[in-house]
Amino acid sequence: MKFHIERKYLYGGLTAFIVIVCSVLFSFIIYNFKTFNLGFDKFWKILQPIINGFLIAYVLCPVMDFYSKKVLVPLFKKFKKNLSDTDPKVKKLSILLTLVTAILVIYFFIQMIVPQLAQSIKNIIISFPDYLNQLEALVQTVFKDYPEIESLLNDNYDSLEKFANSSIMPSLSKAASGIYSGISTSLSFIWNLVLGLIISVYILSMRERFLGQVKKIIFALWSRKCAKDIINEFRFINVTFLNYIMSSIIDSLIIGILCFITCSIAGIPYVLLVSVIVGITNIIPFFGPFLGAIPAAFIILLTSPIKTLFFIIIILILQQCDGNIIKPKLFGNSTGLNGFWVLFSILVGGGFFGAIGMYLGVPVFAVIYYDIKRRINIRLSKKGLTTDTDAYINNENNIEVNENV
């Protein structure tokens, strides 16, 4: 008698076996999480230069395209040489110019900004006890006619001084010593950055081939229609992320420069340190200005309480200009999200991934929002229903009419 196995039982058995194996593997990973975590950290450190190379190449792509399409191609046309931006000569020259630009920017940052930032931080640490004495003298001068308030503030000042001597000063001293002990970490970061820059050159030179290989894999794994949809989806993701990243960098640079100019005119102390803090934190949407203004205002408060008020006024004016003039010009409607969803994406991204999540939460959610909206509109169109959201606000009759279309 011939033995026969029905397919449904075979598939059911294989499914159960796969589920059991996956459950065992998952339990094994959970119970040996520390070992896997150490292995992942080591794997991450090994891949760090390569990841840096891809990130650097991704950021430098617009610079390379600018040199190739806007500078070199028109320049060659003036010499009656019709070369496209994909010509090997144009590509090599654009990569060279892009690399020189990146090196000059890094050199400027290290040479001009880092020493002054380190000196400002060092001066704050050294002068912190003097700032406390000045604050006590100011309290006594201002409230000498109000002994009760002066007594209350002096009591709080004593508590503040004890807290500063017991907690803040040791922490500042530890941070100062940590600067010197972190030299090896900084050197490792610089080394990975250099390797990433070298790898990015290879990635930029082989960009078209890499993209071609990725498309080849996509067309091999999916049908032609599905493959085209996937490629279009990735193009939308690329445009959304690139526009958002470049716009936020330019916006933060503009705000940092304006902060430096206005604070210099107003005579704000530690102007470079304050401007760098304001510029960097401005990258984070919505909460960034507050995250940068609070520590910067505290640093200025240690030196001059009156100028702290000027600084707060300057920041408020800058943020109004940024929100109403600069950001709309740079970003436009690149994310397609209203204020609520922007705030939602920042809170969720920040809750899961910290500052990086707050920064990248907006473009990630914009891509998810766009994909869900597109799929919903496709399903509504297949049912003959309108895709206009306003039609669904207390207007069911029009929806029923459209359903019969």
Image: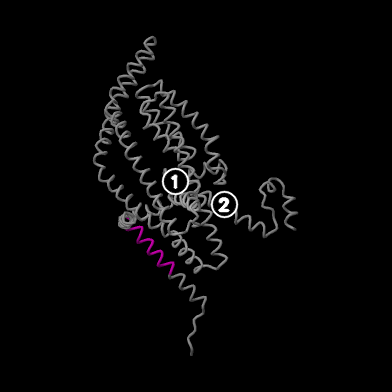
Image position of 235 with respect to 327: above or below: below
Predominant SS of the magenta segment: helix
Q: Nearer the viewer, residue 47 or 331?
A: 331
> Could you say which disc has been placed on residue 189 in the image?
none
* Coordinates of residue 28 in the picture (x, y in percent): 35, 61
- The figure's colour scheme reads one colour
> Exactly how many numbered labels are in the figure?
2
Magenta stretch contains residue 175 = no
Q: Which amino acid is tagged 2? A: Tyr
Q: From the viewer's perspective, is 365 left or right of 162?
A: right
* Coordinates of residue 38 in the picture (x, y in percent): 30, 55
Image position of 316 with respect to 4: above or below: above
Image position of 212 with respect to 69: above or below: below
Q: Nearer the viewer, residue 1 or 364?
A: 364
In the structure shown, which secondary structural element does the residue marked by tag 1 occupy? helix
Q: Quadrant of the C terminus?
A: bottom right
Label 2 crowd (10 A; few <14 / some 14-19 / many >=20): some
Q: Which residue is mark 1?
A: 357
Q: From the viewer's perspective, is 187 left or right of 241?
A: left
Q: Which residues are magenta?
A: 18-33
Q: Residue at x 30, y 28 (%)?
A: 124
* Coordinates of residue 311 in the picture (x, y in percent): 43, 26
- Outermost residue toward the bottom? 1
Q: Residue at x 28, y 48 (%)?
A: 188
Label 1 crowd (10 A; few <14 / some 14-19 / many >=20): some
* Coordinates of residue 121 in the picture (x, y in percent): 31, 32
In the structure shown, which secondary structural element does the residue marked by tag 2 occupy? helix
Q: Which residue is mark 2?
A: 370
Q: Nearer the viewer, residue 25 or 9?
A: 25
Circles 2 and 1: CB atoms closer than 8 Å: no
